[in-house]
Amino acid sequence: MLALGVFVIGTGEFVLAGLIPLLAADFGLGYGAAGQVVTVFAVTCALAAPTMTTVTAKWPRQRVLVTAGIVYLFGAVATALAPTFGLLLAGQVVAAVGTGLFIPNASVTAAALVSKDVGGRAIAAVITGFTLAVAFGAPGGTAIGALYGWRVTMWLAAGVAVLGVIGVALFIPRSTGVADTGGFRQRLEPLRDRRVVALLATTLVAFTAVYIPYTYIGAIFSPATGGDGVRLGLLMTALGVAGAIGNLVAGRLVDRYGGSSVVLFALLWLILSFAVIAFTHTTYGWSLTAIGFYGIAAFAITTPQQHRLIARDPAGASVVLSLNQAVLYLAIGVSGVVGAAGIEVVGAGSVVWIAAALAVVAIALSMLGTPWNPRRDTPPVSPDADTSTAESLRSSSGQVRS
């Protein structure tokens, strides 16, 4: 049910880029002006994730998730009914608040529902909702919008959101909670940890690199698709399917080798995939292969990064993950700016080399946040561990085994 909720919210987020031409035509706007809906959504999410998580920190996770789903639902309905572009933006602000609250808390809840040694797989299962949103939700929503209008897409998103809210209310135990870390200033205490800051910086730079090819997928692969929207949709689907596989495999590898090693391997794979795209983006068959190769690495980073942050600060896991989510949305915005500038300077076909350079920087930042033993990001809790430590780990990462 958590994965379904992430799928719905992820579809509502990623489909916006595909609906921009329809919004521009409907409201009589230029493409750039209509594109501000993506900027508004991302910025609101970046602000809402840590703020709303702080406000709801003492709530049971079920209540937090249901509230977030309802807020998103209201935003989707308001968007579907919006008579003007200004009111549409207001609806998306509401939807983004729900998104910023739901996503990090879904991952924390998943980790809290299972034993510590399968926490990576639990987080990966939830994050799979995002990859499926990229693979099927966004292309499908774009196609439906093209055939029946963008409002129908938003109504469908709202309808599935209702199912997600009901499912979370029924299946997530009411008693599930996480450790409370105190007031707002105390909740920002993790930022005093150099390694936490390094991990958040890794998220920013790594996902800026990841999202440059995704944001400008149409421009980069234009020689292969010839501007055909169906071909582009198939590329997006291949990306999402490969991403789902990469995410699930990463979850298992995290439980075995630790998050730090998986992030390093994924970033190295990502750099190689950018090189493959640079040499194959003009031929459609090879482009399908290249986009799949890239998708595996791109979506294999999220789960180990979240796992590393939870392991680094178990008691403040929900707050740290909300900060991570805020940084991720910031990366989406930065990727648009960097990618646009890069296309002007080096061209669409070569902009992936800028992404590759950013991935190299991300590796350096990741090493700053790596503990001395990268195989395990946190030591196991021994039978004689103090009660407060055990309780903190139990509340954030699942039941601690003796």
Image: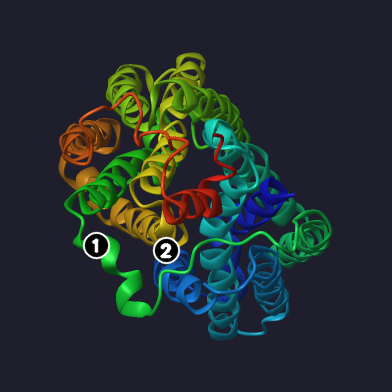
User: Mark 2 or mark 1, which has the lower sequence index?
Assistant: 1
Q: Residues under labels 2 and 1: Cα distance?
A: 11 Å
The answer to whether residue 168 of the structure is visible from this angle is yes
Q: Position of residue 352 (x, y in %)?
A: 27, 33
Residue type highlighted by circle 2: Val
Q: Residue at x 46, y 14 (%)?
A: 286
Q: Residue at x 58, y 76 (%)?
A: 27
User: In the figure, is residue 343 to the left or right of 255?
Assistant: left
Q: Residue at x 57, y 31 (%)?
A: 118
Residue type highlighted by circle 1: Leu
Secondary structure beneath dot 2 equals helix
Q: Which circle marks residue 242 in the picture?
A: none
Quarter of the image where the C terminus is located: top right
Q: Position of residue 255 (x, y in %)?
A: 49, 26
Within 10 Å of disc 1 (Cα), the crowding (few <14, some 14-19, many 20+) is some
Query: Which image quadrant is residue 150 in?
Result: bottom right
In this view of the protein, which residue sits in the foreground, 21 or 209? 209
The answer to whether residue 232 of the structure is visible from this angle is no
Pointer 2: what residue? Answer: 319
User: In the figure, is residue 297 to the left or right of 227?
Assistant: left
Q: Position of residue 341 (x, y in %)?
A: 21, 51
Within 10 Å of disc 2 (Cα), the crowding (few <14, some 14-19, many 20+) is many
Residue 337 drawn above or below residue 69: above
Q: Position of residue 376 (x, y in %)?
A: 36, 28
Q: Which circle marks residue 191 in the picture?
A: 1
In this view of the protein, which residue sits in the foreground, 81 or 106? 106
Q: Are marks 2 and 1 in contact (CB under 8 Å)?
A: no
Residue 101 drawn above or below residue 276: below
